[in-house]
Structures are given as structure tokens and as C-alpha cells.
């Protein structure tokens, strides 16, 4: 009797030595793995595309839901390529429409991300680490210290989970401005960028993806080598090395001049992030120096109000003073934007993301008031 490939039992076909997480691979690497797996079972080649699209393009929570595939194939996929999840412990809804997600990871750690709607734009601020080691004085995440790096699937998974919940909520823009310093976790962020941008991944345009960094030089150089038009934002927050060192300890290792020199290698337009702190960095002289630094690289300036909840001991610059500061920049030809505070009632604003791992967390509860 002639045995055709389609008659071979999948149980006897070769399988990975142990389950593989396809979500932690770039779409190209995942496709290569799936192609070999499909060929090893003598399955038709079109199964590769059907399987791959279910990772990111049309994601599903579990392989059992892929009803376009035969059940034995779904069972084999669940065995060989399980789909790890981020669990939404708490979802908080702000009065301004901003939503903050507290994601529980498989090892019990937790991270936060924030979805900010603005007209047709939906910007998701994502985390790249659990906690942060940099201890910038104005940032709440730094106060919790560093726990661990996120894997690529945990970074991109923050977008995937929102799409799973409601595809209409899928972010149009992604910013690496949540918990952690992205360029201290470059290997995982590098893969996550590919997943976010690839047509076989989440398909978000490179110009709609921004990586914010304090300035980690080796990773900045690697990031600059990527051909896509990803955006770079530099967490500047001071205009001299001495003043920056007072609020950002990383300045001792990667000084302001070296960071700006590395930024000059980028072919994309750069943004300076500048949190306004009363009597620290909001003087006329600061504005004049900032204008010179911005002109040097043709950078945009994002002015961010400081939120006391994220920075005990520091005082926010008054709104009138922020407007005068921004006007002084514009009068010198610098494109400066004062960012409107969003999600203040749920501690979702810049610099406020922090997970208190000791508190009790009700699962999957939506709240319009803070749970901290």
C-alpha cells in the first residue's frame, strides 16, 4: 500500500524537542519554523500562511479558536507552539478616555501600559522592563527599582492583547515610554520593533513607532543602523550635563554631549522630551540653551508637565510659566509642543507608571477611579 503524506499521523511526525514560543520570534523566523514543521507533517504549504496570520495579523487567544484548521492540527499547534498571554489584572478608565492596563506576567510580575485616544489616533504607551534601574528623580517607575527585562513577546504582547480584546481598539501609534529604559533591553526591543512593524506582524508603520531613551550609547548606535523610519525621542530634561546629573544619574555614564553626538547618526527627525520642574529646569536660560540644542539636530521639543504623584519632593512648573517657556522656544524658531496631561485621575501620565506589587489586585476589573 502506498502511504501519502496526508495519511501520516501527526503523532508520528517530528515535533520540537520542547514547546516553542512563536510569539517571541520575528515574523520571518516564526514563518521558517512553521514551514519546517508543516513540511515535516506532509501538510499542504498553504497551512503556513494560515498559521502565521493567527500570531499577529488576526491574533487568537488559543489555537482551539482557529476553526479554519482541522482539529488535530489545532491540537498539535497547542502542544508544540503554545500562545502565552498577558493577563489584564486591572483596566482603569479615565474621565478623558485614557485607559491604563495592569498586565500580569507568567512569573507573577506586573507591568503597565496606557492607551490614549485622540480623534482617529490611538497611541499605546508600552513598557519594556519590569521596573527601571535608572532612578530619574521625576519618574515613579524608577522608585520601584529594576526587576527584569521583558521578552519580545511581552513587549509586543501589550498591543496584541488589546487587539484581542477589541480589534477596533488596535493602536495606530506605539511609544516606548512606559516602564523601563528600552535601550537597556535592546535585544528584545529590537525583535519587538520588527513584530510591531512587519506586515506579517502587527503592521504598524515605522513612523508611528517611537522609542524613548535617556541615551544608552551602544544601543543607540544599533538602533540607528535599522533601515526603518522608527522615531527616536531623547529624554533630555536638562540643558547642561551638571544639571542633568542632578535629576538623571545615568548622566554620569552617558553624558549629554555623547548622547547628542550619537543622536546625530539618526536619519529620522528627533524629539526631545522635557519634563518641566519648578526652579530646576524652567528658567529663561534653560529655554535658550534648549533652543540651541534643538537647532543643532533639528529636533522637535515635547514639553511635559511634571505630575507630583510621580515625583515626590519636586514641584511642577506652573502652567503660565510653561506657556512662557514654550513661547520663548518658538520665538527662536523651535517647534515646541506642550503636551496636555492625560489620565491624571488614574495615574497614567508620563512618569507616573508604577506597579505596587504588594497590594491586592482584583482581576479583570474595570475602574473609573484609581485602585492604588
Image (cartoon, rainbow, N blue to C red):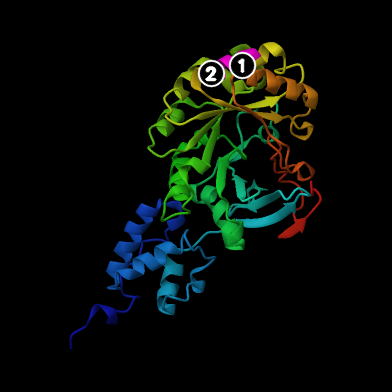
Look at the picture and state if 189 lies above or below 23.
Answer: above
Q: Secondary structure at mark 2?
A: helix
Whether residue 255 is visible: no
Q: Which residues are magenta?
A: 288-295
The mark tally for this picture is 2
Look at the picture and state if 219 lies above or below 97.
Answer: above
Asked whether residue 293 is drawn in magenta, I would say: yes
Q: From the image, which quarter does the N terminus lie in?
A: bottom left
The one of 314 and 79 positioned closer to us in this rendering: 314
Q: Residues within 10 Å of mark 1 (few under 14, many from 20)?
A: few
What residue is rendered at 48% in x and 41% in y?
207
Q: Secondary structure at mark 1?
A: loop
- Left of 369 or right of it: where is 192? left
Q: Residues within 10 Å of mark 2 (few under 14, many from 20)?
A: some
What residue is rendered at 66% in x and 32% in y?
142
> Going from the N terminus, do you reach mark 1 or mark 2 first?
2
The one of 81 and 290 positioned closer to us in this rendering: 290
What residue is rendered at 39% in x and 54% in y?
27
**Which residue, given by chain and number where applicable, does mark 2 sit on?**
295
**Which residue, given by chain and number where applicable, does mark 1 sit on?**
332
- Horizontal and vertical percent position of residue 161: 58, 57
- Horizontal and vertical percent position of residue 64: 50, 73
- Horizontal and vertical percent position of residue 53: 43, 63
Give the foreground label among 1 and 2.
1
- Left of 369 or right of it: where is 91? left
Is label 1 in contact with label 2 (beta carbons under 8 Å)? yes
The one of 32 and 167 positioned closer to us in this rendering: 167
Q: Report which quarter residue 223 is drawn in.
A: top left
Amino acid at each position: 500500500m502506498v502511504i501519502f503524506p496526508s495519511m501520516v499521523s501527526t503523532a508520528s511526525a517530528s515535533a520540537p524537542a520542547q514547546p516553542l514560543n512563536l510569539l517571541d520570534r520575528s515574523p520571518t523566523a516564526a514563518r521558517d519554523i512553521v514551514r519546517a514543521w508543516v513540511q515535516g507533517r506532509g501538510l499542504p504549504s498553504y497551512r503556513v500562511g494560515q498559521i502565521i496570520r493567527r500570531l499577529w495579523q488576526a491574533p487568537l487567544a488559543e489555537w482551539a479558536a482557529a476553526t479554519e484548521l482541522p482539529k488535530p492540527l489545532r491540537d498539535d499547534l497547542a502542544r508544540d507552539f503554545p500562545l502565552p498571554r498577558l493577563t489584564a489584572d486591572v483596566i482603569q478608565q479615565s474621565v478623558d478616555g485614557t485607559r491604563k492596563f495592569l498586565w500580569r506576567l507568567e512569573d507573577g510580575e506586573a507591568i503597565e501600559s496606557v492607551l490614549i485616544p485622540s480623534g482617529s489616533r490611538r497611541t499605546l504607551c508600552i513598557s519594556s522592563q519590569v521596573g527601571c534601574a535608572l532612578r530619574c528623580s521625576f519618574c515613579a517607575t524608577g522608585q520601584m527599582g529594576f526587576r527584569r527585562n521583558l521578552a519580545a513577546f511581552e513587549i509586543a504582547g501589550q498591543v496584541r492583547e488589546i487587539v484581542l480584546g477589541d480589534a477596533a481598539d488596535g493602536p495606530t501609534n506605539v511609544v516606548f515610554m512606559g516602564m523601563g529604559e528600552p535601550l537597556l533591553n535592546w535585544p528584545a526591543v529590537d525583535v519587538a520593533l520588527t513584530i510591531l512593524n512587519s506586515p506579517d506582524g502587527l503592521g504598524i508603520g515605522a513612523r508611528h513607532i517611537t522609542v524613548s531613551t535617556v541615551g544608552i550609547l551602544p544601543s543607540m548606535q544599533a538602533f540607528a543602523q535599522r533601515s526603518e523610519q522608527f522615531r527616536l525621542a531623547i529624554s533630555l530634561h536638562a540643558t547642561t550635563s551638571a544639571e542633568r546629573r542632578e535629576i538623571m544619574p545615568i548622566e554620569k555614564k552617558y553624558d549629554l554631549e555623547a548622547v547628542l553626538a550619537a543622536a546625530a547618526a539618526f536619519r529620522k527627525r528627533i524629539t526631545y522630551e522635557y519634563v518641566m520642574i519648578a526652579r530646576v529646569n524652567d528658567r529663561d536660560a534653560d529655554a535658550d540653551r534648549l533652543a540651541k540644542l534643538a537647532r543643532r539636530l533639528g529636533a522637535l521639543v515635547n514639553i511635559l508637565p511634571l505630575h507630583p504623584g510621580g515625583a515626590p519632593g519636586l514641584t511642577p512648573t506652573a502652567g503660565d510659566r510653561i506657556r512662557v517657556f514654550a513661547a520663548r522656544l518658538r520665538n527662536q524658531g523651535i517647534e515646541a509642543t506642550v503636551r496636555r496631561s492625560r489620565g491624571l485621575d488614574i495615574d497614567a501620565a508620563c512618569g507616573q507608571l508604577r506597579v505596587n506589587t504588594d497590594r491586592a489586585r482584583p482581576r479583570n476589573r474595570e475602574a473609573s477611579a484609581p485602585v492604588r
